[in-house]
Image (cartoon, coloured by chain):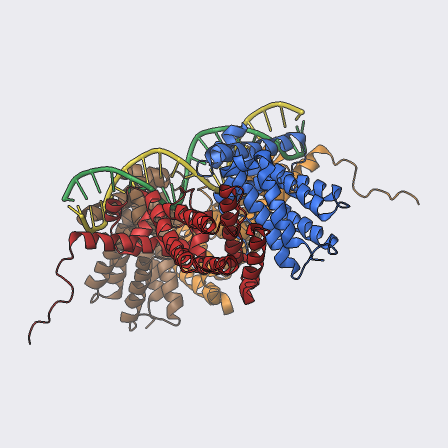
Chain colours: A red, B blue, C orange, D brown, E green, F yellow
DNA sequence: CATGAATGAGTCTTCATTCAT
DNA sequence: CATGAATGAAGACTCATTCAT
């Protein structure tokens, strides 16, 4: 019987192995956060669930907070990706359409992992704003700037702030506490109306 | 979801001494939360800062959560009072004026103890919605119902939700992260515009 | 409407009042021990259940152990009474009959409060042998001495010891763990047989 | 009655270092129990005496009860071993001889650690019957069954019960309170007499 | 003498982190 | 680099007891 050819290399190159370990840790952490919240997410439990020794975990992360930060970064990145692609795809669309798409994209982004999102925001000891979050802010600012002809912007920062906060807050609260508002796109439509009237330049 | 631990105070302080003790505990807890966040707010530290023995603390609160709940209740009560009195005083005013006053009242309410408010919302392990919060929701619902002639309300619950979340979210974020937006009442004015157009019935 | 005549004196004479307080405390303690075991029998709980302030409790008992000792004393006294009256009543009976009655009396005594008896023996931190227990030992010794003509006694103390320990141990274990052995007086009969043969003088 | 807390060791010590740690903990616990009783046997004290950190202790035992259970198991195991080997060695002996040996073995077993035995039985919050205790019951039942020709057994369970309780109770009480009865084997002889007459089939 | 508020030493237990192997 | 045994500071909470009123 001829030897089966290995499919996986005997040894993954160092970097890849590391990456897998890191990934396993982050995934384990995310699962535990989602399922049981921050309270029971001890580093030992995370390591165990990741199939990694506690010693190894500390090889890759200097402390617990670093793990949480990375989990958040990864999660917000995924969310930002959705928003970003939508923003790009609707660059040429009229404000009304683009705004509607933007809001729908935000809902979709929040639906990736609503519980994790909530836990990260409400239970995990204050994390610095992630770079991914900053990216969303940038996207929204760009969204406004690009359409300065259709939009009434006296104070750009204030507008970005209102846009961002309103969307995030309403979408998140709806996803968690009022899923019924997402039925038939009620909330999305209302939000589009509200924000459209806010942004629109009265001709 | 049944609670396993009660959060109601253990004994009603009958004597003045007791009342003072309870007060000292809540004040100490609020200070520590404000200054150092939830993480270092151990029951022992709270007791110490309150100038009270740990035993006394547990005479009045069955567990740590009960303290946090009471701190929140007290804080939200103070906020609700401001909002309530404004809502009452503007009952006869036209929507635009009343809404503006409402928003200003909310800002004022948030300025009572912004950091405490934030810590309570973001660091303290999920507390049940306080009865004071429920009161605010009621106030807003009433605000809308009373003006049904001037307001376009297809879905009352949804409108209350949007109104409440938007105000809370924007005011809170501004107070904490962008106090500059409150200069010259910029934010208040913008918010009034946004929400007015949201609520107004097109004649 | 004529004043109802008081039934209870305005003030019980001091001693009686004290006695009632003490009694209430002991009864409360016994109930708690029986229902929930020693672990939850805190002095505060005992006082509360007795309808007495913790301060008063400490007026009558110097410490917790004193309460436990008194509870035990009272309980063992009640048991001893049954045994004593039986011993007295059977003084003239032949050994066989008297022994049988004695054993039945012991079973009856154990049935007064089996759980309390067990808790007192197994959970309450070692109490000194109560004076009531000593009384039982005396009764048994007397039982043997009185019948020295029918009984083979080489070593009186040893015989008393064997008699007492055997009865106590078997009856207690049966009451708690094997009530079925008490059906149809199986155990009593067997015990009578065993101990009779142990005590009997071979003519 | 379902248990809320497990009492089985947390991890099986694979390495020798672990085994030694577990051993040190059990030995320390036994010493403290013997010397000062259950009341002062705090987990911290046990760990300290074992020369082990409190954290290590909880690595191997999920809670205090588990330690006590393990201490008891180890102790009762040692006792059972003595009894078992005696029962095996006397399998061919006549009842009288075997019974005498059995009783002597029980005395020897109780002399291994009389105080510990007592503390375990009387002060440590009720432990489940250990598997080792169950083994002793089995041994005695076997003892009786094997000699059914010489023994009068109407109710096997009752006989085992009487045999076991009587021996345990008398031997234990003697070892603790009346060592003088063990001088010159007085007690052993008397017990043999009593139990022999109880068990013997009248030809 | 009664009351009950106050005390604080001490309990069990967890968990982020280190380091010898 | 991986492992996992070990650490110990720190946390929530209890309860016998005291003492000012």
Horizontal and vertical percent position of residue D51:
26, 37
The residue most toward the left is A2
- Which quarter of the image is occupied by the N terminus of chain A? bottom left
The residue sitting at 21% across, 49% down in the picture is D19
Q: How many marks?
A: 0
Horizontal and vertical percent position of residue A88:
40, 57
The residue sitting at 27% across, 39% down in the picture is D52
- Left or right of B51 on screen, residue C157: left
Task: Give whichever of D96, B99 is nearer the camera.
Answer: B99
Task: Give whichever of D24, A110 is nearer the camera.
Answer: A110
Can residue D199 be seen here?
yes
Horizontal and vertical percent position of residue C69:
52, 40
The residue sitting at 47% across, 34% down in the picture is B44
- Left or right of C72 on screen, residue A51: left
Horizontal and vertical percent position of residue C35:
55, 52
Is residue D47 placed above or below C110 in the rendered structure? above
């Amino acid at each position: 019987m001829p030897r089966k050819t290995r499919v996986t290399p005997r040894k993954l190159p160092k970097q890849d192995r590391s990456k897998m370990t890191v990934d396993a840790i982050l995934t384990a952490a995310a699962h535990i956060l989602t399922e049981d919240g921050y309270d029971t997410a001890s580093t030992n439990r995370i390591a165990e669930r990741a199939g990694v020794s506690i010693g190894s975990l500390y090889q890759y992360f200097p402390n617990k907070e670093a793990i949480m930060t990375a989990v958040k970064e990864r999660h917000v990145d995924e969310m930002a990706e959705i928003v970003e692609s939508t923003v790009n795809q609707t660059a040429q669309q009229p404000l009304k359409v683009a705004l509607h798409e933007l809001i729908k994209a935000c809902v979709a982004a929040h639906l990736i992992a609503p519980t994790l999102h909530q836990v990260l925001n409400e239970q995990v000891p204050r994390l610095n704003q992630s770079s991914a979050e900053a990216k969303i802010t940038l996207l929204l600012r760009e969204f406004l700037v690009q359409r300065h002809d259709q939009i009434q912007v006296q104070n750009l920062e204030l507008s970005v702030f209102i846009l961002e906060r309103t969307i995030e807050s309403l979408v998140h609260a709806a996803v968690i506490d009022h899923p019924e508002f997402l039925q038939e796109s009620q909330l999305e439509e209302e939000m589009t109306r509200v924000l459209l009237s806010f942004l629109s330049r009265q001709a």
